[in-house]
Image (cartoon, rainbow, N blue to C red):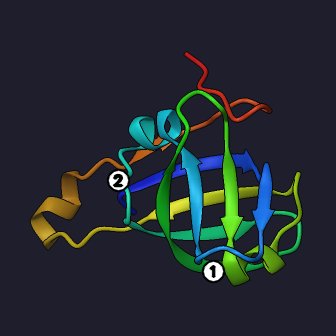
Amino acid sequence: MKSKIHRVKITQAELHYVGSITVDEDLMDAADIVENEKVQVVNINNGERLETYVITGARGTGEVCLNGPAARLAQVGDVVILITYGLINKEEGRTHVPTIIFPDDNNKLVS
C-alpha cells in the first residue's frame, strides 16, 4: 500500500461521465495521490470493490464523485476507502511507511 484515504463519503455519482473518481485536491495532496493514479475504491456500505483512476476535484470542497459505470456501485453518502499501491523492492518494503489520512465526516482534513 502506498497511500490510503480512510473513510470518506461519496458526495456525488455521475453515471453519464467518462469513468473515474473525482477527489478534492486537498485530500489528494494529503494522501500523496496524483491525477490519473490508479486507485482501489472499497465501499464500506455495500462491500463493492472497484479500480479506477483519480481526477483532481476542486480544492477544499470535500468532493468525492464516482463517475461513469462505477457510479452504479455506490450511493451518495456511502463511506469508502481509497487505496493506492506502489511497486517497491523487498528492502524498501522493510522500511516503507504508507501515507494514511483520516478525513472528518465532511471529507475535510483534520489536524
Counting the numbered discs, the total is 2
What is the CA distance from the residue labelled 2 to the residue labelled 1? 18 Å
Query: Quadrant of the image for the N terminus?
Result: bottom left
Secondary structure beneath dot 1 equals: strand
- Can you tell which mark lies on residue 69? none
From this view, report whether residue 104 is shown above or below residue 110: below
Side of 111 relative to 86 (left or right): right
Farthest residue, direction bottom:
69
User: In the drawing, what numbered circle is on residue 50?
Assistant: 1
**In the depicted structure, whether residue 33 falls above or below residue 105:** below
Toward the viewer: 22 or 37?
Answer: 22
Residue for point 38% across, 57% down: 35
Whichever of labels 2 and 1 marks the residue nearer the N terminus, that label is 2
Residue 19 spot, x, y in % from top left: 59, 77
Nearer to me, 21 or 51: 21
Residue beneath disc 2: 34
Measuring from the top left, give residue 63's x and y in whole percent. 67, 43
Extreme residue in the front direction: 16
What residue type is disc 2 on? Answer: Val
Nearest-to-viewer mark from 2 and 1: 2
Q: Is residue 43 left or right of residue 94?
A: right
The residue at the point 43 percent across, 35 percent down is: 30
Picture quadrant of residue 88 = bottom left
Identity, as a three-letter code, of the amino acid under mark 1: Leu
Q: Position of residue 33 (x, y in %)?
A: 38, 51
Q: In the image, what residue occupies the spot 65% across and 28% down?
A: 108
